[in-house]
Amino acid sequence: MRLRLIGCRAPSCPAYVTGVLAGTVSVCMTSVREGVAPFWKWTEKRGRERGGTERSGAEREGAPGASGGSSKAIHHPAASPANTSPNPAPFAPARSTYSMAGAGVGSNDVQWCFSQVKGAIDDDVAEADIISTVEFNHSGELLATGDKGGRVVIFQQEQESKTGHPQSRGEYNVYSTFQSHEPEFDYLKSLEIEEKINKIRWLPQKNAAQFLLSTNDKTIKLWKISERDKRPEGYNLKEEDGRYRDPSTVTTLRVPVFRPMDLMVEASPRRVFANAHTYHINSISVNSDYETYLSADDLRINLWHLEVTDRSFNIVDIKPANMEELTEVITAAEFHPNQCNTLVYSSSKGTIRLCDMRAAALCDKHSKLFEEPEDPSNRSFFSEIISSISDVKFSHSGRYMMTRDYLSIKIWDLNMENRPVETYQVHEYLRSKLCSLYENDCIFDKFECCWNGNDSVVMTGSYNNFFRMFERGHRRDLTLEASRESSKPRATLKPRKVCAGGKRKKDEISVDSLDFNKKILHTAWHPQDNVIAVATTNNLYIFQDKIN
């Protein structure tokens, strides 16, 4: 560890990013000069997660697992006119009406009720059991979770008729569990590669089997999930227990037959995509052509073909020739849901760039730049940190995209770049607590966001195991809590409110009593129904609506 005097810790500050890349100790002299506070902090924590805090920022040059980056190009969508036509969305729209209970009164108000909770109740949580990603498949029948131990757990929804409750949809039960990634060690660079699952993305189902992509920091794997309920019997050269027979003892020939057996779910790796990223992978996204997908790390985005594992095409590279000039990093990336030539990626400076792969093979020059001018009245030492975008998601229609920064959710119209069409404050009451959140590293938490099936409601997580919903058409919001105290079957969730200051009402919670160790970073919404999954530290909560 070297001691080096660098400038401000804001993510867009060149000195800050350079210090993180070099693994140095940063001393924020800017804050001392301006009289804000003498923030003397170690930045080594950025290279290694601590206390559940998500990583952000590129790692030092020469990180493990790369051998020169991407190599030869695969077939590029720009070379084929057929790839430019939009494809239909791979799922049916959800209900067209939605109104949140607690936010208004109406015959179609949705009351959210508890359905299930998965995971141990123990207060002593093992690091490997912390959930790191949640994802529904395109039909919503399957729900996958990944954890820091490299495991993937898939839940399957039962048929509604089995539950016996007309107001309850089918429950989700464990369908398959497998070890997706193992910890590795780069002996050349003496660095450990964690097994933590960063992202899971489902591929549309085309036969009886299901396929999903899972990734850790360096390696992406394509998994096949298949069922087997029959086994072959009647071999000629093999006994039923598997022992081989002496061919000289075979006097008659038998025709092997299939016999029924207990259902077995098998997970097998079909492809392994490795050695293409120098920095940590933060995003993967399947293209609407269902033949290619992208993977993004802190400085580069690569395009892969699902059938080709030894070659990828580098389509975005923001790494400067001189790393001292680095001012921002890529935080998230996603393909457009029905235009296979369009993708977006967000940055730590709060900007979103839309790229068209038809324009050029290397998309360093964006087609559109989405950026909102900063309000001078809200300018502070933490402005650049909290403006970093942690997640970006296209709406199912493809007309809008949603971004999540530390304090808010913004909805952007793809036809308007200068400002978002909607802004929702997730936990504005934390603005006065930014100094404390900086000291305990919570200010670097990466919250994800999601749309409901018809794009009328957006959802994201917060602290104290709260999660927030915002109804777009009526500009109404709702705060709910994932808690075992309210985990009785079909128990209606009560809206929660946080008191930022002044006299606290009976049902309100003081901002000073919020537990910042309890946080919901990962959320998912069923593509067709009002069923949501939210991940607390090591528990997966599933909630569903109860129509009045």
Image: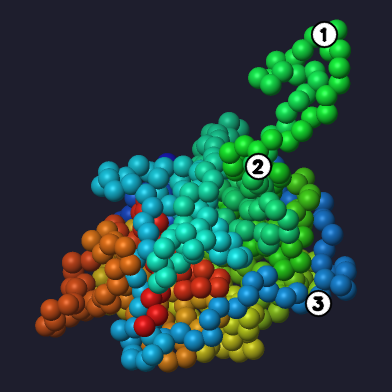
What residue is rendered at 81% in x and 75% in y?
84
Which three-letter amino acid code belongs to the residue tagged 3?
Answer: Ser
- Indicate the position of residue 359 as horizontal and vertical percent values: 80, 75
Determine whether the residue tagged by mark 2 lies in a helix, strand or loop: strand
Q: Is residue 431 above or below residue 144?
A: below
Question: Around disc 2, counting alpha carbons within 10 Å, would you say few (fewer than 14), some (14 to 19), or many (20 or more)?
Answer: few
Q: Which mark is residue 85?
A: 3
Residue carrying label 1: 249
Q: CA distance from mark 1 to mark 2?
A: 32 Å
Relative side of 149 to 335, left or right: left
SS at circle 3: loop
Residue at image location 88% in from the left, 73% down from the top: 81
Judging depth in this view, the residue of 53 and 290 nearest the camera is 290
Which type of secondary structure does the marked residue at label 1 adopt? helix
Q: Which residue is mark 2?
A: 228
Quarter that holds the N terminus = top left
Q: CA distance from mark 3 to mark 1?
A: 63 Å
